[in-house]
Amino acid sequence: MNQTKFLKIGLLALLPHALWGQDVATCRAELKNDTLRLENQQVARVFRWNRGHLISLSLTDKRLNRTWALSGTGPDCAFPGHATPEGEGILSVRQVVGQPNEADHLEVNVSTQL
């Protein structure tokens, strides 16, 4: 039986404000064309969407105004026998209200078919 497998990558997109003293309202995740951008007021991370098989493109420290271009050409996470993306990736973003043991934060999930 051919089973469809899904890879669910939970991205800890942005550090909670308890660690950095920032408001969750400054956090965002945006998928535009083939580019996924995760950012807050401290950092930004840019990925090529690649049908949900994310490829890191750059990391920016906004406080230092410094960007590092990343040179990888393949997906950041790959499994043997699944080199070519199948299906389309799904992006879900939700704001999580903090609990006593965690701060408010933005939760970003990328689900993709293997």
Image: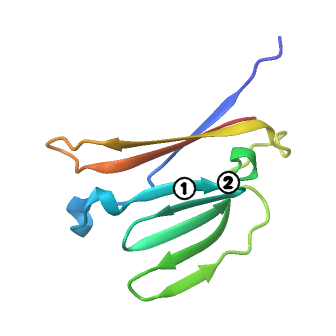
Q: Which residue is mark 1?
A: 30
- Would you identify the image quadrant in which residue 35 lies? bottom right
Q: Is residue 16 above or below residue 100?
A: below
Where in the figure is residue 107, as x and y percent of width and height? 41, 45
SS of the residue at dot 1? strand
Which mark sits nearer the N-terminus, 1 or 2?
Answer: 1
Residue at (75% x, 35% y) in the render: 114
| Kind of residue at badge 1 | Glu
Q: Which residue is mark 2?
A: 54
Where in the figure is residue 34, as x and y percent of width and height? 72, 56
Residue at (44% x, 57% y) in the render: 28
Residue at (71% x, 55% y) in the render: 33
Is 105 positioned to the left or the right of 89 in the image? left
Q: Is residue 40 above or below residue 24?
A: below
- Would you identify the image quadrant in which residue 72 lies? bottom right
Residue at (20% x, 60% y) in the render: 18
Question: Which circle, 1 or 2, is nearer the viewer?
Answer: 1
The residue furthest top is 1
The residue furthest left is 100
Where in the figure is residue 24, as x and y percent of width and height? 30, 57
Total of numbered circles in the picture?
2
The residue furthest front is 32
